[in-house]
Amino acid sequence: MPRFPALSSASNSLQPAVFTRLLPLMRSLPEPALPLHIGDTWLKPPAAAMLDRVASGRELYPYSSPAGDVGLRSSFCQRWTDLGLQGLDVDRVHVTPGATGAVQAAIRTFAGAGDDVMLLAPFWPLVRGITLSCGANPVQVPFYDRLRAGADVTASLEGALTDQTTTVYLCSPNNPDGTVLTAAQQLEVAQFCQRHDLWLISDEAYCDHAFAPHKHRFIANLPGMAERTASIYTASKSYALAGIRIGFLAGDPGWLERARRVSTHQIYNLPLICQRAAKAAIDEGDAWLAEARDKYAAAADHVHRHLEATFHPAQGGGYVFCDVSAELNGKPTLTWLAELLHEGVSIAPGVAFGAHYDQWVRVCYMSLPVPELAVAIERLNRSLNRLRSGGELVYDGPRLELDLGGS
Amino acid sequence: MPRFPALSSASNSLQPAVFTRLLPLMRSLPEPALPLHIGDTWLKPPAAAMLDRVASGRELYPYSSPAGDVGLRSSFCQRWTDLGLQGLDVDRVHVTPGATGAVQAAIRTFAGAGDDVMLLAPFWPLVRGITLSCGANPVQVPFYDRLRAGADVTASLEGALTDQTTTVYLCSPNNPDGTVLTAAQQLEVAQFCQRHDLWLISDEAYCDHAFAPHKHRFIANLPGMAERTASIYTASKSYALAGIRIGFLAGDPGWLERARRVSTHQIYNLPLICQRAAKAAIDEGDAWLAEARDKYAAAADHVHRHLEATFHPAQGGGYVFCDVSAELNGKPTLTWLAELLHEGVSIAPGVAFGAHYDQWVRVCYMSLPVPELAVAIERLNRSLNRLRSGGELVYDGPRLELDLGGS
């Protein structure tokens, strides 16, 4: 019973989000760095989804349904049904504050104190803190980069299983490394979950951004998976609407009803104006989305051809994830990132995506049009080449702190 | 280690919000009941805060600060400083999804598994589920109605203290019963918290709605309280903006920084458009607010003079809380509420506000203009008078279920 001034163990386990901690250093720069660190897009949202189009009506001001607007849920069901998810209906959907809120509600529903959650790594940074905030233990499993290097899916998963594992967190197309699981790989994940009675959280935030010939498939469609899979989506990445904070949690009503209660006790309901913008994007955004995907694919292609670093090409998503251990040769990654900021480009430190990735960095290709992206990549190449030819880090300004906390 | 299909104990402890469960029955009515059950207002928000006034700009679409827009935080600081809170600045404020998000972040920061949280009752319904969702134990302490009947503050609090108590949840002006603590009562609460090293969560959602001569005072101003008090506010009740979901959590940066992390891992950031509407309301809403307070005071006065039930007059807030045990005389409250719905008026069941209040009901006076409110009160009086003169409940439609779950 630790009282004032002691704090709860859940709150003590958390650190600020990685991008929050980059901010003070970024603000201190003489001129802004080209932003390749965060997953924001340079594109303007679909015209139909602009907030000024949906900003009138008295119904925007009282409380609305904690489950989410039924019209929005219905549009989402139609779209994911069109994309191939089977058996979806409005009672199997809960609207959340972005994918963040959906992952939060799902993990809190499936895991608590003493439970292990397998985070297939490299992973979306917030998922680790979310797991800790639920009192559960994040088990980091090097996965996507190992698969790309030929590792076996089942062996990777079985090797990380514990007696306490209740839940697996999967993301495909993956943030940060752009891996799109094949049908065969997906089946192995599904069979692993069934063999060990595990819940699966399938983060499909980037489902609209798989590049041909790679293809997004719904893992919940596989036999025996519908009842144990939490499928997660967001308007943020598909429609350039990160700022309106609308996401979706979909799955069996048996557990989804519990997740609704978790969410209701965190936020009550979401602003109706934001739900309307998301609905307009889903209803009228197909052509916009096709164009956006082409633009991102062209940007990815530019990075694949020009970035002089060690990475697997993105099969989808919005990023490449680079192993810079050879270039850094023991030099501290965070000092290099601070130096890069002063050279006019910001990228994200790999350690935020998993403890095994301390010598990696994530580069976003959605955040700038290709001409500016090209400038940023040139700056990055110049620094990498200098390091490769034996150059030292010269930066001696304020340090970038990145204690990720927790266990 | 309960795996699929077992769920976490946190999610198992929760039930849907009380108003969510009234909805199916309300929707089945031949015509809508006059709504005195939920704390929505009939007033339109201040003109400056209408969403169509703040809906343009590219900056609405990317991520924004997880701490909240600094302009909004600054406006809030100015306003609460003007109202008398000492020592406030933007680093002592975190913007949350309504008061719900603020209470959630505060309880999760101060309490976890094995901790007791004292809920001074009758209390805002969601706080009990929020406490359970944090793994902590809600200790319900009959309080406000007992004080109004002459009970001693310190004795009431000391009698409910356990070795596991870490936190006290206080609300003044109180939802549901309109009690505004006196300066002397507030001092006793503060001294109790200091004597036992407790955190205090001070829910001040109704701070703008105390009716003269009653006066809202900031408990955080009392000696020794600034560092242990989480002061909570929302745009919902002051400015008729419940639908935009903007609240505030204020206090010492030492713990507030932890609460920010909790919040960031639940929602990341809040929609900037909603934060702008809240800022406009705070900056330009003074005249609107003065008028709204007069209207609510007139509505409260109508209820005080005409509602034929046992209650303490509201000193502020938006509700009266009635003891209907004499009228019900053992009849089930929920059956009566269902019968009332069919007679055209909806009110909230007391049990949602605390286990000791099974034979009580909450009546909102903010939700209708006085002429319609008068019709609703007449309907309520007619039913109460029928019960008092020995009438039985005649309703035999669908039952209202209200298992509140948890311990």
Image: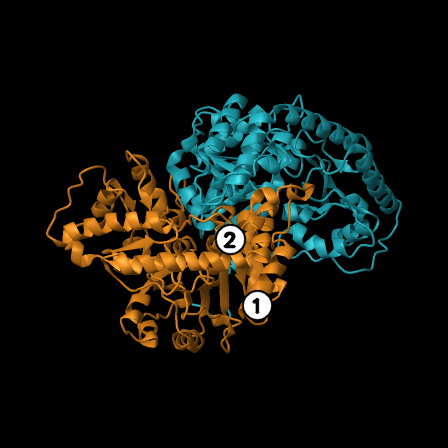
Chain colours: A orange, B cyan
What amino acid is labelled 2 in the image? Ser
Q: Position of residue B129 (x, y in %)?
A: 56, 51
Viewer-closest of B198 and B91: B91
Q: Dot 1: what SS? A: helix
Q: Position of residue A326 (x, y in %)?
A: 17, 58
Q: Dot 2: what SS? A: helix
Residue plotted at (11% across, 53% down): A389
Residue plotted at (44% across, 45% down): B63
Q: Is residue B234 visible?
A: no
Seen in the picture, residue A98 relative to A170 is either above or below; the reply is above
Q: Position of residue A63 (x, y in %)?
A: 64, 45
> Residue under mark 2: which chain is it in?
B
> Residue under mark 1: which chain is it in?
A
Report whether mark 2 lies on the same chain as mark 1: no
Q: Quadrant of the C terminus of chain A?
A: bottom left
**Residue located beneath label 1 in the image:** A82
**Residue located beneath label 2 in the image:** B133
Q: Mark on residue B376?
A: none
Viewer-closest of A58 and A263: A58
Viewer-closest of A166 and B227: A166
Q: Position of residue B167 (x, y in %)?
A: 48, 41
- B215 sits to left or right of A399: right
Dot 2 and dot 1 residues touching (CB under 8 Å): no
- A355 sits to left or right of B90: left
- A332 sits to left or right of A214: left
Viewer-closest of A306 and B224: A306
Residue plotted at (31% across, 54% down): A363
